[in-house]
Image: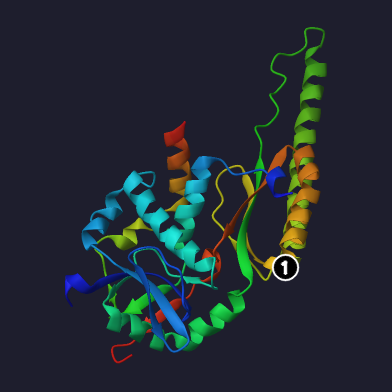
Amino acid sequence: MSAGSWLCAYAITRNRPLALGPGTRLVGHRELGVVVADVDPARYERVDTLEPQDATLAELVREHDAVVRAVFRQEPVLPLRFGSILDGEDAAVRLLRAGYEQARACLADLDGHREWGVRVRRTASAPPSSRPDAGLTGTQYLAQRRQKLKADEQNRADLGAVAERLRDVLRRHAAGRADRTRAPGVLVDDAYLVPTAGESAFHGEVQRFADEVRGHGATVETTGPWPPYSFTGFELEVSADG
Amino acid sequence: MVERMELAPAAETLVDLLDRVVHRGAVIHGDVIISLAGIDLVRLDLRLLLIGIEGALE
């Protein structure tokens, strides 16, 4: 192994002529290719010590995303995880040989699809009627407060039901769904693999639900289109004689 | 229709990107891959990451 030949691998795609950015090239094997660039390992030094919002990490990640997207605009793409560094072009060919059938089947499934993120988030809850109305007796105040709590609870249950209906409907418009880690206050954080021909129907459903969700004190947001990052969660094993 | 949709705030856009690029995508094993020191540790706990970034931007 020589450091001079280290390659950063971004994605597996079809072995076809691609317009790629400077420094990036396709290493092909039969019908498949892996998009790589020569890499200076020093760039990844101490990457583990960086804060997530550190500009260095964000820059590396954006670079990775830009290469994957450039390929994705032209061909179906199977993104590789950030920091996949290969030991030269021979290693790239061995990777393609070892993962050939798995990768080819995956690309066929992903062809004609894009990933969309959908998030339902509670908006800041209505400010509580902080000071009891001067005219209310203690009993009246407590009754009012109980009523408010009950209404909030009902609203939360209704919102949960709407969110589940939204998820069911969107799932029917998609080839796949992946759950993502949810931040506090987020009810739904899903990724959907949507056929491009069905995108307007998919977004139409999101729109149809938007008012209903808003009525329950929440919003629906979408992100995308993304390359199918959330739908390529498999592992490629390259044995020593691969 | 697309322009009427609500967009995620910028901090979460970065979290979405980090999550996808760093946590998702196919993983390669075997002797073709060079293990970079600490690269596995970049796979941060996303919950911490969400709170961390939102906190940092407040």
Q: Which residue is mark 1?
A: A197
Badge 1 crowding class, 10 Å Cα cut-off, few under 14, some 14 to 19, many 20 or more, is few
Amino acid type shown at disc 1: Ala
Residue A87 spot, x, y in % from top left:
26, 76
Q: Is residue A51 left or right of residue A103?
A: left
Task: Residue A34: name its quadrant.
Answer: bottom left
Q: Is residue B37 left or right of residue A73?
A: left
Residue lying furthest top: A134
- Examine the rendered structure and indicate whether residue A95 appears above or below residue A73: below
Nearer to the camera, A230 or A158: A230
Residue A143 spot, x, y in % from top left:
81, 23
Nearer to the camera, A48 or B4: B4
Q: Quadrant of the C terminus of chain A?
A: bottom left
Please report, as a chain letter, where disc 1 is located.
A
- The secondary structure type at the circle numbered 1 is helix
Residue A214 spot, x, y in % from top left:
76, 39
Residue A164 spot, x, y in % from top left:
74, 56
Q: Residue at x 59, y 74 (%)?
A: A110
